[in-house]
Image (spheres, helix red, strand yellow):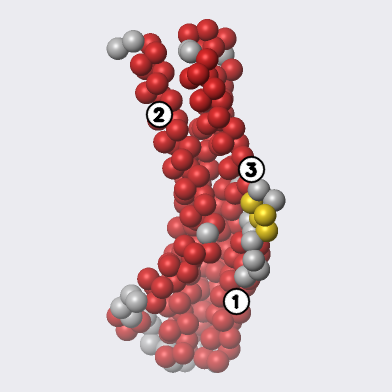
Amino acid sequence: MSFELIIRLLSAIAAFVTILGAFVSATATSSTASAWARGIRARLPLRSVRKEPVAPDGVTLRLLEAHQVLRRQESLAKAHRFGGGLLTFGQFVVGGLLASSFMQQEIAKQMIGILGLLVLASSIIRQHYQPEIAAVAARERAVKLKAIIREVEDQMYYAEQNLPEARSPNELRRTLTEALNDVDAAEARALAAHATFVGKPKPPI
């Protein structure tokens, strides 16, 4: 296998990695993807509700919703980290190889231009979507929501044991509702931060 063929193969891999990273970052940030995920969750069977600790239906259903949102935030964090890693490869690894004098001497000018465009595309996409920052934000939302879920589950246990420190079901449901509203507001702010691309504002949500 000739050196030129190896370079072409590596270029194809770099292009695939860059495109995949862009797709993952864009999909994880897209409001359309979020709507699809919510639609799929809405169609899932609610059998797990009956497996939750005994509690008023309103608290149990809200707790189930909180668990679903928690799983979504954890999935978003993983997707953003994955997309960011792919774009980092396209920007820095390929860019570093391209900057070496050996590669510039051995690769045809046309191939150098293609690789340069891939590095530029990775840099622009990474700068726009900022997957590393989005991953940290999703992880923080997941950590806060998980803490509230644990608190509510503790209160449900206290209610089962008839302990005096148990809070009322209405108060527990209100706590979960406020936590879910905070997550929705944080996601809306994150989408608004990415509402422009190439200087063209998107219509308001």
- Residue at 45% in and 58% down: 75
Q: What is the x, y in percent for residue 103?
A: 51, 12
| Tag 2 and tag 1, C-beta contact below 8 Å | no
User: Separation of disc 2 and disc 1 at Cα?
Assistant: 44 Å
Of the residues under marks 2 and 1, which one precedes in the sequence? 2
- Residue at 39% in and 77% down: 42
Of the residues under marks 2 and 3, which one precedes in the sequence? 2
Q: Which mark is residue 127?
A: 3
**Secondary structure type for disc 3:** helix
* Residue type, label 2: Ala
Of the pair 161 and 91, the residue shown nearer to us = 91
Binning the other alpha carbons within 10 Å of mark 1 as few (below 14), some (14 to 19) or many (20 upward) gives few
- Residue at 68% in and 58% down: 201
Of badges 2 and 3, the one in the foreground is 2
Q: Which mark is residue 48?
A: none
Q: Is residue 148 left or right of residue 61?
A: right
| Tag 1 and tag 3, C-beta contact below 8 Å | no
* Residue type, label 1: Asn
Give the residue at mark 2.
12
Q: What is the x, y in percent for residue 31?
A: 53, 64
Q: Eyeballing the image, is 77 above or below 104? A: below
Give the residue at mark 1.
181
* Residue type, label 3: Gln
In which quadrant is the C terminus drawn?
A: bottom right
User: Separation of disc 1 and disc 3 at Cα?
Assistant: 28 Å
